[in-house]
Amino acid sequence: MIRLCIVGVILLLVVSSCSRTTHPTGSDKVVIDQLYFGRNVKGIQVVSDSAWNNFLADVVTPRFPKGFTFWPATGQWRYDDAQIEREASFVLGLLHQPSAVADSNIIVITTAYKQRFHQESVLRVSFPARASF
């Protein structure tokens, strides 16, 4: 899984063409956001591959038109009643310069997914990084 994440980030770096402010070492200050999208609602898979592709086209691509990376994953979720569910998931990797616009776009994406597919949450993990193209 870690190798897959690294490959995903590398692919994202290759296809992304963000505007850059170059650091003296030749790398740019960026943020990596990883969004984790579950595909189930109470044990039933409701997000098909075609529904996911439509979501990418309708919601993600207009907000990050320069590119992104996604990959399938398997996750585990514990409900408030302590029931544990394992489910197929998607991870969406976004590499962008720090900005209020990017943060706002990510909020729109996570909110739209929760509404469209009746999800309780979408996990967002953000960390600063440096990238060179």
Image: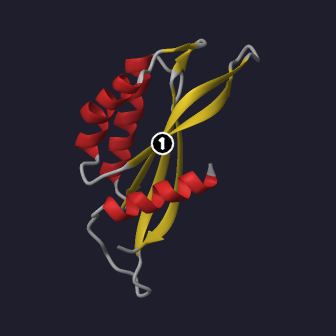
Residue located 39% across and 57% down the image: 12
Which image quadrant is residue 97 in? bottom left
Residue that carries the numbered disc 1 in the rendered image: 71
Q: Is residue 109 left or right of residue 62?
A: right
Local secondary structure at mark 1: strand
Residue at left 51%, top 24%? 39
Quarter that holds the C terminus: bottom left
Q: Nearer the viewer, residue 50 or 24?
A: 50
Q: Which percent across, then down, holds residue 91?
A: 50, 41
Classify residue 20 by image quadrant.
bottom left
Residue 15 at x, y percent in the picture: 32, 60
Residue that sits furthest to the right in the current view: 82
Q: Is residue 11 above or below residue 25?
A: above
Q: Name the amino acid type tagged 1.
A: Trp
Residue 116 image-quadrant placement: top left
Q: Is residue 58 above or below residue 19?
A: above
Compared with 89, 129 (above or below) is below
